[in-house]
Image: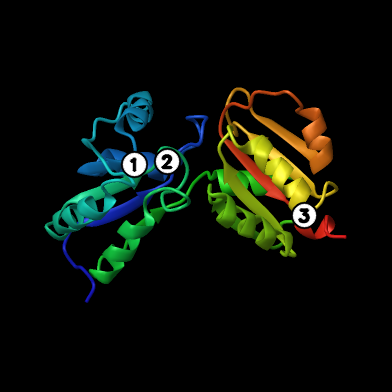
C-alpha cells in the first residue's frame, strides 16, 4: 500500500564540482525539506552555505546507512520530508542511496528523484568513444584476483565501459588494461570534471600512458574504455 501522508523521500543530485551545476528544483527541495541526509555534512554544508540554505543536516553514509535508513523511513512515515544527497552527483551511483530507495519502495513510500549532473554521463559524452550503448562498472575490486577477473570481463565487452577509479590507482589500471586487453585499446581519462583543472586525455592506452608518464595523479578520475577496438 502506498504511503499517503505528507512525508516524502527525495533523492537529490548535486554538483560534481562547479556549484552552478544544480537545478532550480533541487534547490527548492533542499530548502523545503525538514532534513537533509548527507554523505559528508562538511562537504554538503559548503553547497548549502553558497545558496543560503539552512535545512538541518545529518550524516548518511556507507557505514551507517543500514541503521539510518530504518530510522529515517520511520520519520518519513510520520510526515517528515527527507532529502538524501551524496558528496557529488546522484545518490545510488557508486554512492549511498540504493538501499534507501529499495527499502522505501518496500515500505510503500515512492521516492521522488531529482535528476542532475553525473560524472558517469559527463565522462561517457566527453570520452569521444561510442556511447549509443555503454556499460558502467563503478569502482573495480582492489584485490588482484577479483580485479583481474573484472579486467577480463571488460575485455570481452562489445560496448564502451565507464569505470570510476582513485587517482592513486589510475596508472595501474591503464597498465592492467594494456596487458589484459591490448595496448591499442582506445580510452579516455576524465579528470576533475566541471572543476578548475578539468582535463580529458584521449588516445590508445599506450598513447595515454606515454602522455602521462611520471605524472602524480590528483583529483577525481573516470576512465572510459572501448575494449572491442583493442581485441586482436
Q: Return the disc, 2 or 3, that comes first in the chain's sequence.
A: 2
All told, the count of numbered labels is: 3
CA separation in Å, label 2 and label 3: 43 Å
| Mark 1 residue crowding within 10 angstroms, few (<14) / some (14–19) / many (20+) | few
The residue furthest front is 145
Q: Quadrant of the N terminus?
A: bottom left
| Mark 2 residue crowding within 10 angstroms, few (<14) / some (14–19) / many (20+) | few
Q: Where does residue 7 sit, x and y in percent of width and height? A: 19, 57
Q: Return the disc, 3 or 1, that comes first in the chain's sequence.
A: 1
Q: Would you say the residues marked 1 and 2 are in contact, meaning their CB atoms lie under 8 Å apart?
A: yes
Q: Nearer the viewer, residue 154 or 55?
A: 154
Look at discs 2 and 3 and give the one toward the viewer.
Answer: 3
In this picture, residue 73 sits left or right of residue 113: left
| Mark 3 residue crowding within 10 angstroms, few (<14) / some (14–19) / many (20+) | many
Q: Residue at x 34, y 40 (%)?
A: 39
Helix, strand or loop at label 2? It is helix
Q: Which mark is residue 24?
A: 2
Q: Residue at x 74, y 53 (%)?
A: 180
Helix, strand or loop at label 3? It is loop
CA separation in Å, label 1 and label 2: 6 Å
Q: Where does residue 135 sit, x and y in percent of width and height? A: 63, 60
Give the residue pinned by disc 3.
181
Q: Quadrant of residue 157?
A: bottom right
Q: How is the image coloured?
A: rainbow
Q: Where does residue 35 sit, x and y in percent of width and height? A: 22, 42
Give the residue pinned by disc 1.
28
In this view, 155 is above or below 35: below
Q: Nearer the viewer, residue 47 or 129?
A: 129
Helix, strand or loop at label 1? It is helix
Q: Nearer the viewer, residue 55 or 143?
A: 143
Judge whether residue 128 can be spotted in this image. no
Amino acid at each position: 500500500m502506498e504511503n499517503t501522508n505528507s512525508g516524502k523521500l527525495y533523492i537529490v543530485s548535486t554538483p560534481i564540482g562547479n556549484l552552478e551545476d544544480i537545478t532550480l528544483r533541487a534547490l527548492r527541495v533542499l530548502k523545503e525539506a525538514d532534513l537533509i541526509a548527507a554523505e559528508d555534512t562538511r562537504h554538503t554544508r559548503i553547497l548549502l552555505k553558497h545558496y543560503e540554505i539552512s535545512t538541518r543536516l545529518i550524516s548518511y553514509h556507507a557505514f551507517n546507512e543500514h541503521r539510518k535508513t530504518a530510522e529515517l523511513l520511520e520519520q518519513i512515515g510520520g510526515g517528515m520530508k527527507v532529502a538524501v544527497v551524496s558528496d557529488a552527483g546522484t545518490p545510488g551511483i557508486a554512492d549511498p542511496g540504493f538501499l534507501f530507495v529499495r527499502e522505501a519502495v518496500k515500505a510503500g513510500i515512492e521516492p521522488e528523484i531529482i535528476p542532475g549532473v553525473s560524472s558517469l554521463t559527463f565522462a561517457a559524452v566527453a570520452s569521444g568513444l561510442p556511447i549509443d550503448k555503454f556499460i558502467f562498472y563503478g569502482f573495480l575490486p582492489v584485490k588482484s584476483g577479483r580485479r583481474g577477473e573484472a579486467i577480463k570481463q571488460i575485455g570481452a565487452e562489445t560496448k564502451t565501459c565507464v569505470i570510476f577509479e582513485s587517482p592513486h590507482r589510475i596508472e595501474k589500471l591503464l597498465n592492467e588494461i594494456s596487458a589484459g586487453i591490448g595496448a591499442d585499446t582506445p580510452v579516455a581519462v576524465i579528470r576533475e570534471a566541471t572543476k578548475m583543472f578539468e582535463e580529458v586525455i584521449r588516445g590508445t592506452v599506450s598513447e595515454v600512458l606515454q602522455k602521462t608518464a611520471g605524472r602524480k595523479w590528483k583529483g577525481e578520475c573516470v576512465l572510459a574504455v572501448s575494449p572491442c577496438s583493442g581485441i586482436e
